[in-house]
Image (tube, grey):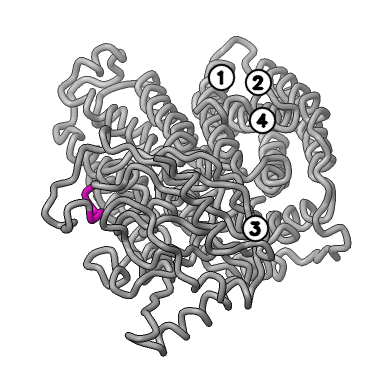
Amino acid sequence: MTNQFRLLATHRFRPFFLTQFLGAFNDNLFKNALVVLLTFQAARWTPLDPALLANLAGGIFILPFFLFSASAGQLADKYDKAALTRLVKLLEIGIMGVALTGFLAHSLIILFGALFLLGCHSTLFGPVKYALLPQHLKPDELVGGNALVEAGTFVAILLGTLTGGLLAAAEQGALWIAGGGMTVAVAGYLSSRHIPPAPAPAPGLKINPNPLTETWRNIAFARQNRSVFLAILGISWFWLYGALFLAQFPAYAKTLLGGGEGTVTLLLATFTVGIGVGSLLCEKLSGGHLEIGLVPFGSIGLTLFGLDLAWASPTVIPSVTSMAIGDVLAGPGTLRILVALMMLGVFGGFFIVPLYAMMQSRSAPEQRARIIAANNILNALFMVAGALAAGSLLSAGLSLPILFGIAALMNAAVALYIYRQAPEFLLRFIVWLLIHSVYRLRTRGLEHIPAEGPAILVCNHVSFVDALVITAACPRPIRFVMSHRIFRWPILAFFFRHSRVIPIAPAKEDPAMMKAAFTEASSALAAGELVGIFPEGRITSDGKIGPFQPGITRILKANPVPVVPLALRGLWRSTLSRGDGSASRRLPRCGLLNQIELIGGPALNPSTVSLEILQTRVTELRGK
């Protein structure tokens, strides 16, 4: 976890992080302060019902996401994102000036106008902030950067909400709100001035002024890459799921726990801290690179703890309301409820951070901001749909615990749909689970694997799970050429098939399969993919590296690409090796004891590669 916090000391990340944090803080300060003010002082402003005003305020704030996200995406792709950020922050200062006018004039229309403009501010900044990260961060920093942004955003939401409520309750609260908002806006602008330039990826882009046609166009951009679009659907579902729980906190605290505003704050803080912890843990659990295997792990936790929250909720409405926090905490089942909420947040962090990093890294740079704009539109659509559905179910007499249970089951259904459409998520989860349970993996020298473009990875063959271990350690997908016998090995066959492993057989056994394997490997390299080969042709039965077979030279002759030597240590005599002639008769060793290593060496020039050189390099890397 150290690496991600080092980003806060860098000039390329710290100013952006502060700008984003202050913007999220100010949004929630003003929005919540206005809602509290109108809830408890509505008679001074308007004859309308306070509940109606609160819902109206929420709708006004989210409306710009539907109207202007498409335009915001175009601007972020066409112009320098650092310059756009400064302009957006200047707009925020002007918005706070409008808010001050509304408070002084006692005008609800002007205040709602300021709230709408604040929604425009967030709409414009959304595509900028997420498209800027891949420009300023290295690929192995993207997960950590997103984790800090997500954790910081939720903390800012919590602090802004609390501060807004406190300012609204103060003497001369309206002026305190306007003054506080103006101060934060100015601080945000000053921090934005230190964000390094982020040149436009598509400066020649022609702006389409029609938001409707541009919205469909942006969604079409996102759909061009199936994994990106599924990541967007996952992100949007998370915001629906999380917003559904957050929206019920006031009613839940009052009707089921018997608490007051302090209890609402406690629930919000617990969930928010969980999100922050889960987000920051992503860097540790992912090994510093994009690990989408955490997404299924997150969805499992979101379902289980959503159900646990439903089961742990009181079934009897307390006779006393507005109890102090201490009395609420002393109530039966309250601690279990808080643990469930905390873990919902933690697993939410596991779920959302890899999806954001995946969306950013796999989007075409010249379309990235517009794809993020499409994500913001779908996020808003899902949250509105979730709010309407929850409102309808509650109006029909459904209880809050049952609503939570239904949402948790729906989460499982949505997750299964996504993983069925993109087995890559589930496959990476299996690999991640293997490396974090049965084995403890250390890596060294993997920076020699190119970040893009074709290359051949050559490694010694020690066990049935060698390909899984290398896959877990490498941030890029690998097309392994593998013996057809191992390819058909029970259980692992599912992984190999969906990982597009290339099965191969000896020429004397199946010449057609051998020819097809070489053709497929050549096609993969021509497409810029990584191809993994175990040149020994079989799993070692004595722990030594066997003679390398000439198949790799045949591939290099057709595709002269860099060759990266790798070596596995520690798998010999492990559960799935042939240390005693049978992999199936031994029980797995404890993951804490079963430490393994994957070591990489400098890439070799294809023109100088020979079988002897390759075998020598792999043997040297493996050592004794």
Upstream in the sequence, badge 3 or badge 2? 2
Numbered disc in front, either 4 or 3: 3
Q: Residue furthest right?
A: 204
Upstream in the sequence, badge 2 or badge 4? 4
Q: Is residue 431 above or below residue 23?
A: below
Q: Check disc 1 and give the amino acid type.
A: Thr
Numbered disc in front, either 3 or 2: 3
Q: Would you name the residue on which mark 2 appears?
A: 177
Please report the residue visible at 71 percent of the width from the left and 26 percent of the height from the top: 10
Q: Check disc 3 and give the amino acid type.
A: Glu
Q: Would you name the residue on which mark 4 appears?
A: 17
Label 2 packing within 10 angstroms: few (<14), some (14-19), many (20+): many
Q: Check disc 2 and give the amino acid type.
A: Ile
Residue 305 visible to an observer of this rendering = yes
Q: Nearer the viewer, residue 214 or 179?
A: 214
User: What quarter of the picture does the C terminus occupy?
Assistant: top left
Horizontal and vertical percent position of residue 124? 72, 46
- Residue 576 falls inside the magenta stretch: yes
Q: CA distance from mark 3 to mark 2?
A: 50 Å
- Range shown magenta: 574-578
Label 1 packing within 10 angstroms: few (<14), some (14-19), many (20+): many
Q: CA distance from mark 4 to mark 3?
A: 28 Å
Secondary structure, mark 2, is helix
